[in-house]
Image (spheres, rainbow, N blue to C red):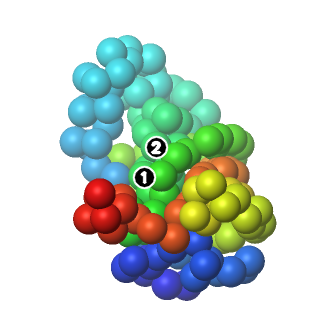
Amino acid sequence: MSAGLQRGVYDKLTVGYQFGRRVTLTETHLLLTNAVMADSVPLHVDEITGRASMYGGRILPGPLVAGLAAVTLGMSLGGAAIGYLEQREVFKAPVKPGDTITVTWTVLEKVDKERFRGGIVTFGGVCSNQDGVVALECTGVAIITNEPEEQTMERT
């Protein structure tokens, strides 16, 4: 697995290619997500409720984990991801403050699109915790160009 494409562009992506990153999600991530999303779900904000739940403690909001996956995809493609078309998630296990999540994306399919100077790529994603437990499985579909934005801007 690569740490990510430095200047990843459409032609360099091959079916089966993998990339990703690892992030430890802290109490701060939980609190900031709750504040930004105006989230007051008891499983996210109330330790007593969390402890009494089947999870044994507070859990992070699913959109935070899904967002981490999406951002990892975009950040790893060096400006070549010019449009994120779709992401579908299946939540498999909770993520708790202190968990270290490894996001891994795999190129599943490519469809050439001349007008994008690249094409549409379908990715399969997995977010696993430090124990190898899969917390999230997802697919993402993005427009990937051979000419990242900074190169396109230089030509104009």
On screen, residue 46 above or below 31:
above
Q: Amino acid at mark 1?
A: Val
CB under 8 Å between callouts 2 and 1? Answer: yes
Q: Amino acid at mark 2?
A: Gly
Residue 80 is tagged as none
Q: Is residue 34 left or right of residue 81?
A: left
State the CA–CA distance, disc 2 to disc 1: 6 Å
Provide residue 129's location: percent of width, then percent of height: 52, 62
- Which of the 4 image quadrants contains residue 114? bottom right
Q: How many marks?
A: 2
**Which residue is at a point 49% across and 57% down the rendered structure image?**
81
**Which residue is at a point 33% across and 15% down the rendered structure image?**
38
| Secondary element at image label 2 | helix
Provide residue 106's location: percent of width, then percent of height: 66, 70
Is residue 56 or residue 102 the one in the foreground?
Answer: 102
| Secondary element at image label 1 | helix
Is residue 93 or residue 51 the one in the foreground?
Answer: 93
**Which residue is at a point 32% across and 37% down the rendered structure image?**
30
Provide residue 46's location: percent of width, then percent of height: 36, 22
Q: Is residue 125 left or right of residue 39?
A: right
On screen, residue 9 above or below 100:
below
The residue beneath circle 1 is 71
Provide residue 49's location: percent of width, then percent of height: 45, 21
Q: Is residue 124 left or right of residue 79?
A: right
**Which residue is at a point 49% across and 84% down the rendered structure image?**
2
| The N terminus sits in image quarter | bottom right
The residue beneath circle 2 is 67
On screen, residue 89 above or below 133:
above
- Is residue 110 among what the camera can see? yes
